[in-house]
Image (cartoon, grey):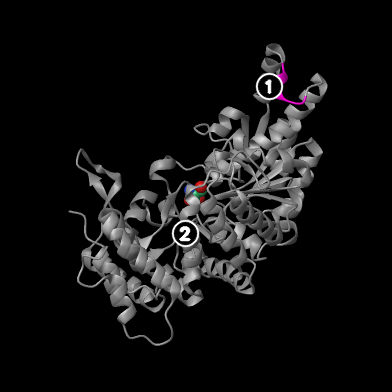
Amino acid sequence: MHDQPTSLLERYLGQERTGGLDPAAVAVIASLDHLRQASPVIASGIARELQSQRTNLKLIASENYSSLSVQLAQGNLLTDKYAEGVPGHRFYAGCDNVDDIEAEAARLACELFGADHAYVQPHSGADANLVAFHAILHQRVERPFLEKAGVSDVAKLGDDDWAELRRQLGSQRLLGLDYYSGGHLTHGYRHNASARLFEAHSYAVDPETKRLDMAEVRERAHAVKPLVLLAGYSAYSRRIDFAQMRAIADEVGAVFMVDMAHFAGLVAGKAFTGDHDPVRHAHVVTSTTHKTLRGPRGGLVLCTQEFAESVDKGCPAVLGGPLPHAIAAKAVAFQEALSADFADYAAAVVRNAQALASALVDRGASVLTGGTDNHLVLVDVAASWGLTGRQAESALRECGITLNRNSLPFDVNGPWYTSGLRLGTPALTTLGMGPAEMAEIADILCTVLAAVHPRPLPSDPTATSKAKYDLADDTAQAARKRVSELLGAYPLYPSLDADLIAEVAVARG
Ligand code: DSN
């Protein structure tokens, strides 16, 4: 239905351009054109988000820019299909096409990571971890129990045996990296299901070096004797020796699980190999697909053959119906990650993070561990500029830099205000930026943060707010100008016409 004099699409097609039409851009413009009739508020929200991502430097370590191919693969009728089960074994009719798509995604994931088995249904990293936990409990606790009881299915257990199995399932131990040392919420943080499913214990980084100490991990593993030894992080900037961690797991009879959500792209792109490649050493590896891996928002579990059947029971153990549209987009992303370009990308992500860390150190910032081996950099803004992470995060966003505050090891400012910032290079590397741009960004960041002053509390002028701050307008304006020059040289989705997008992006009333 076209009640506009000329649709966006018609005008887009009528524009003069060098080179041919980009079908992906046509599809995006057409979808916005259509959506602004169907739901102007949502169309506007999408267009405004594009404008926002185009005009701010994205340094959030867990975000990226997926390709338009990835985005288009999930915007279709696959969303309508129920497909509980696994390819070839579904609980609904008519799953042949979803079977093909899911089997292709799993095949590509195995090829990309060199895994024995891949389960591509988890909707997120948190779901992937729950699927993995349940699979490990199923394989190592439930199956032996059923064998001993002489039955093949929990539904056939008597009430007393079921109560005993539940007791055994509920008394297992998990040993993961402490949240304040960079571990994830789903690794045994008390507010998360993982700490309710397991008796959760943690290991921490060394208070002096802020690095993992394998002797300490070994000592903790021997003391705790966990069912699951879990490695992986969302805020730790060094590589982990997974071969050593597997040896520790074997010493105590634990299943070795790695959550590689943050660095999956570095594994896929062979920036992490040998002892630093978790898939070679762990029994079970979980991931998201949207961080360094640059796919759609979603999760993934890889495992050895031993755990394959248990992992495939993610539905009904944890998940409901799979999201076939998201699985299609995962397949497209895995295919992209198999390219030589992606290996160059992964190497550049690390190179850029190292350039950023070193430029920050050169400008006097306190960088945890003095640098990085991966895609992220942790900055102590309390030690560097007397700020909380919250103040630094807000002041930088005012200047066009998007990142997130982060707790640091043993943080006295807690998880809300924090003392740190977490910076990541995956997204800006996707745009094509390199070490020179990282140095410019470090300079903008240090210039701004040196000019931020915590605001005195009205109730007690000798104390300062942990959230409010003052930053001179001219400093912010100068920083925004530098940001905009950087972004001007590396535009996001350049084939999407800014003027047409602006027409859809109606400001909220
Ligand atoms: N929220 C993600 C991150 O930013 O690291 C992890 O789930």
Pair 2/1: label in front: 1
Q: Secondary structure at mark 2?
A: strand
The picture places residue 466, in percent across and down from the top left corner, at 32, 45
First along the sequence among labels 2 and 1? 1
Q: Name which residue type carries label 1.
A: Ala
Q: Position of residue 182 (x, y in %)?
A: 55, 47
Classify residue 336 by image quadrant. bottom right
Amino acid type shown at disc 2: Leu
Q: Is residue 45 left or right of residue 186?
A: left
Secondary structure under the numbered disc 1 in the rendered image: helix
Which span is picked out in magenta? 152-157
Residue that numbered label 2 is attached to: 423
Q: Which mark is residue 155?
A: 1
Q: Is residue 155 magenta?
A: yes
Q: Does 142 appear above or below 428?
A: above
Query: Which residue is depicted at the point 69% across and 57% down?
Result: 107
Return the mark for residue 106.
none
Packing grade of label 2 (10 A; few <14, some 14-19, many >=20) is many
Where does the image place residue 470, in percent across and percent down from the top left? 24, 55
| Residue occupying the far left of the picture | 509
Q: Residue 153 sits in which quadrant? A: top right
Q: CA distance from mark 2 to mark 1?
A: 49 Å
Q: Could you tell whether 347 is left or right of 492 in the image?
A: right
Q: Nearer the viewer, residue 331 or 381?
A: 331
Total marks shown come to 2
Q: Is residue 366 left or right of residue 400?
A: right
Residue 325 falls inside the magenta stretch = no
